Amino acid sequence: MKRILFVDDESNILDGIRRMLHADRKRWDMQFAVGGEAALQACEAASFDVVISDMRMPGMDGATLLGHIRDLYPSTARLILSGYAEVTLATRAVAVAYRVLSKPCNGPELQATIERVCTLQDIFCTPEIRRIIGTIGELPSLSKTYEALSRAVHEPTASMANVAEIIEQDVAMSAKVLQLVNSGFFGLAQRVTSLQSAVAFLGMDTIQNLALASDTFRVFVPDPRIPKNFCETMQQSARRVALVVRALPLDKTVRDVAVMAALLHDLGKLVLASKMPGDYCAVWSLMQERGCAEFEAEEQLLGVSHAEIGAYLLGLWGINNLVVEAIAHHHHPTRIPHLGLDSSAALYVANLLAHEIDAHPNDLQGEELSKSDRSCLETLGVLQQFPAFRVRSLESLNEDAKAGPQGLETNTSR
Ligand SMILES: [Fe+2]
């Protein structure tokens, strides 16, 4: 049973949460602490899987409490509840919390968020993931630029100018970040030529993720046994999925997270190609033999796919939890509850569309979807809209192909 701790300085709010989640008492062991000190005492007495704290509390506020919990109990998931007016406080909370929920939070949203966090924890604790991470051995560290950037973003006094300055010192990273910013994925009306404007337009979190996207291809170098065009094909595929995300009807926040997730969604393949090339070649052989998708061959041979491997690594690197979550579930979106077309569902839909269009570029109706994909789309509530999404996606991909050589068609596996 998952252990969940709720923290607030007002006991009547905790009573409200207790009543709201009454139906969940059989699946979650829920404890309630009045204030930060009491919460730390409760954590000392017995560990928790998730801690959900109010932001504004006298004495120790939510961000300070979750900072202590991060340092003392790193495997505990941390969520924060914050009012709309507390923008400055919420910025501090982002550094220590997996997710910031707006107050007042309704029952279904709170339940869905807790469930999603717990599912991710479970996936990352499986023996299969542990075995793969053990086989990979020491993980490569990211560039000094990225480390400095990551530290700067989490400083309470973080400034856009400082973040831009750090990236500017790394020519390769600057070029890649600006290329991604101007790629059309983020819908910016004008061309951005300076990193400072890029940070101002997209925010520090997105810029940090873009810097990571550029770094991953420097730290993981595929083994010589892997085909030479592997990295290029993977980046092309990521780019196409990001373009399809752009074509979906999403609001800006959801879209920015989904674009980031699209750009990084197959990172696990790169990890396998560089760290477990023998197993990865066996995956490809099985895929060809069975005519199945790559993730299915990986699941059969390794017990886990590139989706979970990539997400695990990105989680270790401190990437936005929504991006991590979208990547972890990009082949099995219905493992978690969804409230509409969120970033996680959007990545699955875009990935499916991009590959379906690659396989049948001239078929306006699209091929008959597999039973499992149909059922996923139905559960996500977008089966009816799928043909319209396909038309918009095809237009977006065709426009991109006309615009330049980067729009070359690729044929890759999911
Ligand atoms: Fe994938």
Image (cartoon, rainbow, N blue to C red):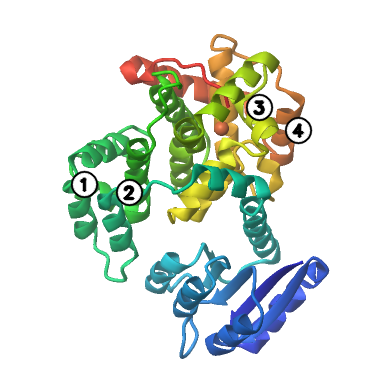
Q: Which of marks 1 and 3 is nearer the N terminus?
A: 1
Q: Which of marks 4 and 3 is nearer the N terminus?
A: 3
Return the residue at label 2: 207
Camera-side residue: 72 or 111? 72
Q: Which of marks 2 and 3 is nearer the N terminus?
A: 2
Q: Are marks 1 and 3 in contact (CB under 8 Å)?
A: no
Amino acid at dot 3: Ala
Q: Is mark 2 within 8 Å of ligand 1?
A: no
Marks 1 and 3 sit apart, C-alpha to C-alpha, by 41 Å
Mark number displayed over residue 375: 4
* Image quarter hosting the N terminus: bottom right
Q: Are marks 2 and 1 in contact (CB under 8 Å)?
A: yes
Residue at coordinates 55% horizontally, 18% vertically from top-left? 357
Mark number displayed over residue 297: 3
Callout 3 environment at 10 Å: few (<14), some (14 to 19), or many (20+)? Answer: many
Marks 4 and 1 sit apart, C-alpha to C-alpha, by 43 Å
Return the residue at label 1: 195
